[in-house]
Image (spheres, rainbow, N blue to C red):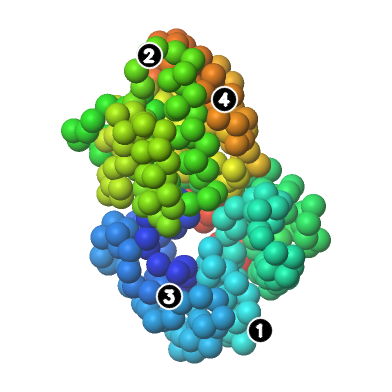
Amino acid sequence: MSILFYFPDLRPGGAERVMLQLLNFFHNRGLCVSLLLGKKEGQLLKQLNPQIPVYELGTAGAKGSVFSLIRFCRKHQPDILFATLGASVAAALAKPFLPRKTKLISRLGNTVGAERSIIKGSIRRMIVMELLKLIAKKSDIIIFQSQYMKRDFLKFIKINESKCRVIYNPVNIPEVNSKATEEAINSDLLAIGRLMEQKDYFTLIQSIAHYKRITSDSINLNIIGEGPLENELKELVKSLALENEVHFLGFQANPYRYLSKSKYLISSSLYEGFSNVILESLALGVPVIATDCPSGNREVLEENVNGFFTEVGNPEKMANTIKLALETRPSFVSSKLATDLKTKFDLRFIGEQYVHVINEFQN
């Protein structure tokens, strides 16, 4: 059985890292996998097993990729097309014209309700929802990253629930532990993710300013990532006189070395699907401060057990949570955090759940 993974590119991102891990896992397990990219680019390309075939459509965006995808699939005849991110839209549009034997598995990336609420403009919002309905209709199986995501999706889009599967994101624990041993600077707080609206770094940075007002303690926030809001965020840091407290580290091929030397990972997101970096943090024994946003966060985080929750978009409450967390840090046992995480999210365990889904098409 041939399995074709399809997504836009391999730039750094949570979904891209998950797909990369699954591709390498499937290949090592002896499955016939290949990768199709809209554009063959991105820093994560070098992390893909070089024995896995990589193809390029040479197109960007769902609309511009449909005909190229149809031609490619008719030529290569994959048994399974596994799509995520914007590629799921192109795959759904192409599905009626693909080889009859080709089954479509779509992996959704975010919580629909929250994503819908921040889309500006009623027409754009309507288009997004119609495209999600199309994905739901044309996919043979839809994979959600958390139970929360599935429940949320079914509130807005009515589909046959027999299509739905919930599979958590995996963590390649040996790889994470190995990379974590490299040298890096220490952080009180470390944030990892693209500099974009969803991650709400504006609130996070403002919370550091508030923290300085309520305590005389020094604090160090390091932010790993690139994105369209970089200049605005740096201007905010400057306007709040936080140059000594907040530091932008840009893209890091190995974020784990920084993560392992942090007191806390902090996630300030407005919404998430299922945060990979939270899993990776716990795998390294580093507790987490996270917004209680629409997401699967509560399916992995527990207050005072492996981290703390704080309110979305509230810098004052976030600062108070940070203060409590830093005061409480010595009570967390890193080895226990890592052991608890491994039982549910190890790559081999999650990878076999994906294999089980694929095997459903052979029955």
- Residue 279: % across, % down: 46, 37
3D distance between C-alphas at marks 4 and 3: 42 Å
- Residue 281: % across, % down: 41, 33
3D distance between C-alphas at marks 1 and 4: 51 Å
Q: Amino acid at mark 4?
A: Glu
Disc 1 versus disc 2: nearer the observer? 2
Callout 2 environment at 10 Å: few (<14), some (14 to 19), or many (20+)?
few
3D distance between C-alphas at marks 4 and 2: 16 Å
Q: Which residue is mark 1?
A: 96
Q: Which residue is mark 3?
A: 38
3D distance between C-alphas at marks 3 and 1: 20 Å
- The one nearer the camera, 191 or 26, is 191
Classify 159 as above or below 279: below
The answer to which image quadrant residue 264 occupies is: top left
Q: Amino acid at mark 3?
A: Gly
Q: Earlier in the sequence, mark 1 or mark 4?
A: 1
Circles 1 and 4, Cβ within 8 Å, touching? The answer is: no
Quarter of the image containing the C terminus? Answer: bottom right
Disc 1, SS = helix
Q: Earlier in the sequence, mark 4 or mark 3?
A: 3
- Residue 241: % across, % down: 36, 31
Classify 54 as above or below 334: below
Disc 4, SS = helix
Q: Earlier in the sequence, mark 4 or mark 2?
A: 2
- Residue 53: % across, % down: 33, 72
Q: Amino acid at mark 2?
A: Asp
The answer to which image quadrant residue 39 occupies is: bottom left
Callout 4 environment at 10 Å: few (<14), some (14 to 19), or many (20+)?
many
Q: From the viewer's perspective, is 139 left or right of 38?
A: right
Kindly give the residue lying farthest to the front in the view shown. Answer: 239
Tag on residue 217?
Answer: 2
Q: Amino acid at mark 1?
A: Pro
